[in-house]
Amino acid sequence: MTMEIETLRTKKEELKCELEAEIQKEKSVEENIKILEEKLAIQDLEEKLQEKRESVRKLESIRADLENQYNQPKAEIPATDDAKENDQTEQSTGLLVQEEQATATEPVEPAEPTEKKKKHGFF
């Protein structure tokens, strides 16, 4: 019987050691899972950050182009009295009013209809 007790105690110790090893392995795997979850969260944030940086870069490029267009002087047309009035109107109201000057051309005669069209009314 003592031999059997020794065998059982040895088996018990082996199982305790194996259980402890599995507990340590479980803790290690759980820690690895947490690390991987954090890495994935960081990777996701880095991707979003990169997309946002790209978006901001494009917007800044558009803004710079528009600023360049705005800052470039326009070719000036010699100011006439009408143009000066337009400038004054724009300055006083804040609105741009563009007037067209009439040119001397022959009056356009309205075209006469060759046939009268019948009107169809649906009631």
Image (cartoon, rainbow, N blue to C red):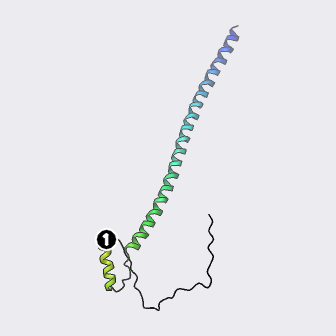
Left or right: 22, with 105 as reference point: right
Q: Looking at the rendering, which quadrant does residue 7 occupy?
A: top right
Which residue is at the front of the view, 108 or 86? 108
State whether residue 84 is above or below residue 2.
below
Q: Disc 1 designates what residue? A: 93
Q: Looking at the rendering, which quadrant does residue 28 occupy?
A: top right
Left or right: 6, with 67 as reference point: right
Which amino acid type is marked by label 1? Thr
State whether residue 49 is above or below residue 17.
below
Which residue is at the front of the view, 58 or 9? 58
Question: Residue at the spot x=51%, y=46% of the render?
Answer: 42
Question: Residue at the spot x=63%, y=76% of the render?
Answer: 118
Q: Residue furthest top?
A: 1
Residue 70 rendering spot, x and y as whole percentages? 38, 72
| Quadrant holding the N terminus | top right
Residue 75 rendering spot, x and y as whole percentages? 38, 82
Q: Looking at the rendering, which quadrant does residue 105 occupy?
A: bottom left
Question: Residue at the spot x=62%, y=24% of the render?
Answer: 19
Question: Residue at the spot x=64%, y=17% of the render?
Answer: 12
Badge 1 local density, few (<14 within 10 Å), some, or many (20+)? few
Residue 38 rendering spot, x and y as whole percentages? 52, 42
State whether residue 99 is above or below residue 7.
below
